[in-house]
Amino acid sequence: MSEPSLLKTNIVGFNTIVIREFSRIVRIWGQTIVPPAITATLYFIIFGTLIGRRLGDMGGYSYIQYIAPGLIMMSVITNSYGNVVSSFFGAKFGKHIEELLVSPLPDWLIVGGYVVGGLLRGLIVGGVVTAVTLAFTHLKIHNIGVVVSAVLLSSMVFALAGMINAIFAKNFDQITFIPTFVLTPLTYLGGVFYSIQMLPEWAQHLSHANPILYMVNAFRFGFLGVSDVDVRLAYGIMIGAAAVLYVSCVWLLHRGVGTRE
């Protein structure tokens, strides 16, 4: 196949994966978009309005303002992960992953297509939760570049993590185990609802081993200008994790792990 023809094939194939993923998100909007909006509303009512009044200010901001970026990032992380793990495992389970594997599309492009699908769902849900946030409080933007780059990198990291989960999963139970018993605890303990400065010293040190802490705080810094961690370190962790996970996904797909067994 000539180089122009191969390029055209790659573009068409990549666009097909992305369009299919976007269509899936929109088609089942009652499962992909509505639940995060309802959950965010409940969080703001219970934690932001009822409990927040008793807690007072945090980091120089009202409690509801302080937790808002964390709630947005939490929705982005969980939905980016959930989209790819369910979509890719569904392709394995339905056996139509074989159509991709026998196509001339390179593995790195297949991974990229699924990651973009995860990004789309994460950003769509993040936008919806942001709209919900603005119904309860106002958000200023300290640094728009940090806001955009932090949400994109975080979404990419967890889309890739979701793909690795889907590659190794052999049944539906195995695609729910990580989100339930690993991702959810890490998210809740990642500084979404509190500043780690409130914790005892040993718990602060333990919290620094949680990668979600860095993502939440980088995103919060973009909005409020406050962070419990060094934002430069947060970017190093996000970029490093994205690179390692991407290379791992491409290698696993190339070796046929979980797809040709």
Image (spheres, rainbow, N blue to C red):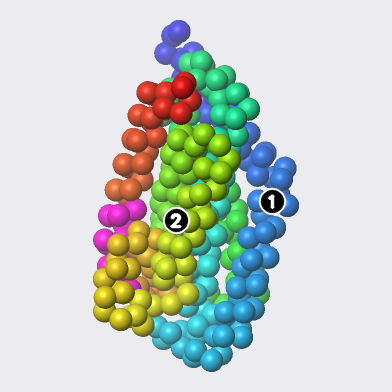
* Magenta region, main secondary structure: helix
Q: Against 256, is 37 above or below?
A: below
Residue ID for mark 2: 182
Which of the two labelled residues, at mark 2 and mark 1, occupies the earlier sequence position? Answer: 1
Q: Quadrant of the N terminus?
A: top left
Instruction: Name the residue at 58% across, 48% down.
Output: 121
Q: In the figure, residue 64 lies in which quadrant?
A: bottom right
Range drawn in magenta: 228-238
Q: In the figure, residue 33 lies in which quadrant?
A: bottom right
Instruction: Name the residue at 48% across, 44% down.
Output: 162
Would you say residue 55 is visible in this rendering?
A: yes
Q: Against 29, is 42 above or below?
A: below
216 or 82: nearer the viewer: 82
Residue ID for mark 1: 31
232 or 215: nearer the viewer: 215
Residue 225 numbered tag:
none
- For residue 119, side relative to residue 25 (left or right): left
Q: Against 196, is 236 above or below?
A: above
Query: For the residues carrying marks 2 and 1, which lies nearer the camera in this image?
Result: 2
Would you say residue 143 is visible in this rendering?
A: no
Residue 231 falls inside the magenta stretch: yes
Q: Residues within 10 Å of mark 1 (few under 14, many from 20)?
A: few
Please name the amino acid that badge 2 sits on. Val
